[in-house]
Image (cartoon, grey):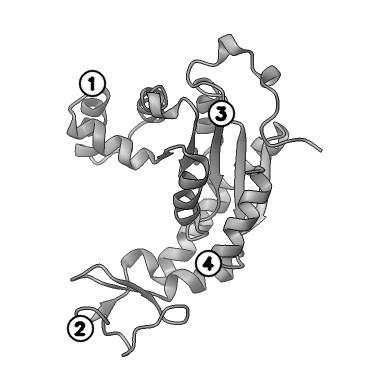
Amino acid sequence: KTRCWPASTRVSLNKREVGDMGMKLILLGAPGAGKGTLASYLIEQMGVPSISTGNILREAIKNNTPLGQSAKEYMDAGKLVPDEVVIGMLKERIAKRDCKSGFILDGFPRTIPQAEALDEIAHIDCALSLEVADDVIEKRMTGRRVCLRCGATYHVEANPPRVKDVCDICGDKLVIRSDDQAEVVRHRLETYHEQTEPLKGYYEAQGKLKSIDGAQGITATEKFAVEALGL
């Protein structure tokens, strides 16, 4: 049975541009599958940082780095930041000391070309895919309610407020975020299946894919992840 983090004979040490020995993990899954929640848990279990390309972009722009300046030009023009710019920022980030023992990538790569570019700068040990059916995700996301005043989050079934559509904390009216509207959720899921889900086949072909059930709740998902990763 192929292990999730095989011996580094797959990629010679001189080809690995960044990082030291340690688990370098990618979290895969549809929007709303629970990747962010699981990443927060695995950070503590593995003692490695979770890396978000969104955070990298914001930090680079804030610090006015050359790549940040380039990204800002695209964003100011209303264009998507090219993959080569994002990969350049990611290469700088994972070369930092806190990534020497590994890292968790949440939300990247999203496409096969991005995964191929990532392979040029880092040796990924495992891609952990959270499997959750579309109807379960739609129910999760469309049931969320948020308080714009204090930031509290609820769910109409899993964590309802004491009074319908009223925040328990500050009494303000709860709203549905635009990202949680049913039409938006369905569109995001369609985009995921078209562009990102093929990554499962990409990493499976490399012997690096592990899939776990993400529909059984947070505690169960954490347990499945620990077992799959051998933590």
Q: Residues within 10 Å of mark 4 (few under 14, many from 20)?
A: many
Left or right of 67 on screen, residue 158: right
Q: Which mark is residue 137?
A: 4
Residue sitting nearer the eye, 147 or 133: 147
Say the numbered circle drawn on residue 176: none
Q: Which residue is mark 1?
A: 66
Mark 2 residue crowding within 10 angstroms, few (<14) / some (14–19) / many (20+): few
Determine contact: label 3, label 1, CB under 8 Å.
Answer: no
Amino acid at the residue labelled 1: Pro
Which residue lies most toward the bottom here? Answer: 163
Q: Is residue 74 visible?
A: no
Residue holding disc 3: 22
Calculate the distance from the C-alpha at mark 3 to the C-alpha at mark 1: 29 Å
Q: Earlier in the sequence, mark 2 or mark 4?
A: 4
Q: Residues within 10 Å of mark 3 (few under 14, many from 20)?
A: some
Sort mark 1 into few (<14), some (14-19) or many (20+) by Cα contacts within 10 Å: few
Mark closer to the observer (2, 4)? 2
Give the residue displayed 35% in from the left and 27% down from the top. Answer: 89
Ranked by sequence position, the earlier of labels 3 and 1 is 3
Pick the front one: 77 or 22:
22
Q: CA distance from mark 1 to mark 4?
A: 39 Å
Total marks shown come to 4
Residue type, label 2: Gly
Q: Is tag 1's residue or tag 4's residue first in the polypeptide sequence?
A: 1
Tell me the SS state at disc 3. Answer: loop
- Identify the amino acid type marked 3: Gly
